[in-house]
């Protein structure tokens, strides 16, 4: 059969790529590409942001193709996405999609900037509604709730891959997803619901057990505010923190202001109980009980806060519950704008939540065989001092996966890194600066499973401590000689 030039062109329409501006004419189902333009190096201005208050990362961006699109997989879906693609040889041939925080509602521009600077084509979505940290999109919009829960990330992924292929004339070699908090839940949702979407996934501090997590967050606020006497003043959180560090800092053989493994800590806040009247330097008996219950969590339904996290307790133990937790129960579980969180009963109401929204929002399935059989790699991490999402939730989910798929498969395909002293997705007194993407890409592309990841503590722009982050259940163990601020003097071992 004779092959004509016309036949060849029609059968391989993207062989040479459409180029950035040409992507505007790409036809995708349920998708309107609203813009496709080349942005010069260091010229990006975040939409809606004040020109003089732009993220410093934008000033380092290389030239890139910026594509904006609206996806409408349902009659009530309005999912905004952006896809950024490095110009020419600056592309490393891979895609790195990035996740959101809280209720989303915005494109994750800073995370996209990091990915683009590292050479990745990158994608982000507002998950189908506008306005970060606002739940007003929920009432009367069940399709938008589905978009937020799982559909938007998947639809974004499908569209991004097509847009990348159209621009460059070839598909991305590998696809990665990188998210923390809500982004961590999105990561695990992708692994469980759409195992073919990504080759490697990073799930940080995953909010994947939505019903129990948000129930525990509401419960913690009720524990603190059940009576005026039970409230721990914010000024006393530092008191609790100092006492827990003093009690458990040295358990790993190194006194460094950080608890290496809080699961070994047996701190009892009763040590701070006032011997006479209430004072700024002690806790009343009622406040001691509040602290004990905050550490313990709600009756085995979800883990509590860890020793070392206390300076962030105002997030959960303030005068109101964490916004996303209150709104999840108010608008999704009870569908009552007047719902009073002080009526919350953990066993009754979390059980209700699991019936009403669990199938939609929970991502706790431990059977990751479909993802692993494809060669997919899952890298999880969580800060031990996280004051928002209990760190043991990640330990528990990791353990459930290992139990389900077997130790051999788990050793090949999943890793968990617990970060001593790190808060929610970053910060804190520990070594919270690290490059999970570098570890994941080496694992996926070169087959080198990470047993440890270099980490550092950066203060005032200078690194003052380095440590290895160790694959759980290993922890960093001091070798007994040399500076305890240098990673070379530590090894990974089970303790």
Image (cartoon, grey):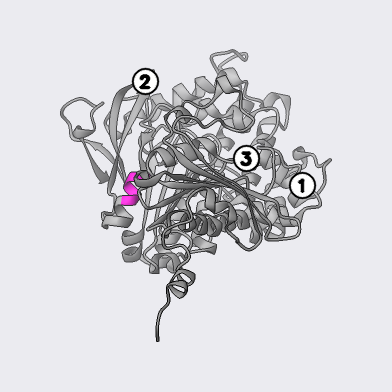
Res 461 label: 2
Question: Which residue is depicted at the point 27% across and 58% down?
Answer: 447
Residue linked to disc 1: 331
Q: Which residue is labeled 3 in the image?
A: 106
Q: Main secondary structure of the magenta part?
A: helix
Query: Is residue 339 part of the magenta span, yes or no?
Result: no
Query: Can see residue 473?
Result: no
Residue 482 screen position, x and y as percent: 16, 26
Q: Nearer the viewer, residue 106 or 319?
A: 106
Q: Say few, some or many: other residues with alpha carbon within 10 Å of mark 3 (under 14 / 14 to 19 / 20 or more).
A: many
**Mark whose residue sits in front, 3 or 1:** 3
Q: Which residues are magenta?
A: 437-441
Residue 282 numbered tag:
none
The answer to which image quadrant residue 236 occupies is: top right
Q: Is residue 160 visible?
A: yes
Marks 3,1: beta carbons within 8 A: no
Question: Which label's residue is closer to the chain start, 2 or 1?
Answer: 1
For the residues carrying marks 2 and 1, which lies nearer the camera in this image? Answer: 2
**Is residue 245 positioned above or below 187 on the image?**
above
**Mark 2: few/some/many CA within 10 Å (<14, 14-19, 20+):** few
Residue at the image position 33 percent from the left and 45 percent from the top: 438
């Amino acid at each position: 059969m004779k092959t004509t030039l016309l036949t060849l062109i029609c059968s391989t329409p993207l062989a040479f790529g459409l180029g950035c501006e040409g992507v505007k004419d790409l036809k995708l189902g349920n998708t309107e590409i609203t813009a496709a333009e080349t942005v010069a190096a260091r010229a990006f201005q975040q939409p809606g942001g004040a020109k003089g208050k732009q993220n410093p990362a934008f000033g380092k961006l290389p030239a890139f193709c910026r594509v904006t699109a609206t996806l409408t997989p349902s009659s009530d879906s309005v999912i905004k996405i952006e896809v950024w693609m490095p110009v020419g040889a600056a592309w490393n041939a891979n895609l790195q999609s990035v996740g959101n925080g809280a209720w989303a509602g915005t494109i994750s521009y800073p995370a996209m900037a990091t990915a683009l600077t590292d050479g990745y084509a990158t994608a982000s979505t507002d998950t189908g509604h506008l306005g970060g940290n606002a739940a007003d999109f929920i009432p009367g919009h069940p399709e938008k709730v589905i978009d937020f829960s799982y559909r938007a990330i998947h639809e974004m992924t499908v569209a991004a891959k097509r847009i990348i292929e159209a621009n460059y004339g070839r598909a991305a070699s590998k696809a990665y997803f990188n998210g923390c908090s809500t982004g961590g839940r999105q990561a695990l949702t992708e692994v469980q619901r759409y195992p073919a979407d990504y080759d490697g996934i990073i799930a940080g501090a995953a909010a994947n057990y939505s019903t129990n997590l948000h129930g525990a967050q509401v419960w913690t606020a009720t524990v603190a505010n059940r009576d005026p006497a039970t409230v721990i003043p914010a000024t006393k959180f530092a008191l609790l923190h100092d006492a827990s560090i003093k009690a458990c800092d040295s358990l790993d053989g190194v006194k460094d202001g950080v608890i290496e493994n809080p699961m070994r800590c047996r701190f009892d806040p009763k040590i701070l109980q006032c011997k006479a009247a209430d004072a700024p330097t002690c806790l009343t008996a009622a406040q001691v009980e509040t602290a004990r219950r905050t550490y313990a969590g709600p009756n085995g339904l979800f883990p509590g806060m860890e020793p070392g996290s206390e300076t962030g307790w105002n997030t959960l133990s303030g005068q109101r519950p964490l916004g996303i937790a209150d709104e999840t129960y108010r608008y999704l579980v009870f569908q009552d704008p007047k719902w009073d969180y002080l009526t919350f009963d953990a066993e009754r109401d979390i059980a209700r939540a699991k019936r009403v929204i669990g199938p939609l929002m929970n991502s706790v399935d431990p059977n990751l065989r479909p993802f692993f059989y494809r060669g997919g790699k899952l890298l999880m991490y969580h800060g031990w001092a996280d004051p928002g999402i209990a760190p043991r939730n990640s330990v528990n989910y990791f353990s459930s996966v290992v139990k389900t798929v077997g130790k051999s498969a788990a050793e090949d395909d999943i890793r968990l890194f617990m970060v001593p002293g790190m808060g929610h997705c970053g910060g804190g007194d520990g070594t919270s600066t690290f490059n999970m993407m570098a570890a994941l890409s080496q694992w996926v592309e070169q087959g080198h499973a990470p047993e440890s990841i270099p980490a550092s503590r950066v203060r005032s722009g200078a690194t003052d401590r380095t440590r290895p982050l160790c694959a759980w259940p290993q922890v960093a163990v001091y070798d007994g000689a040399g500076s305890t601020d240098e990673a070379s003097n530590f090894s990974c071992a089970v303790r």
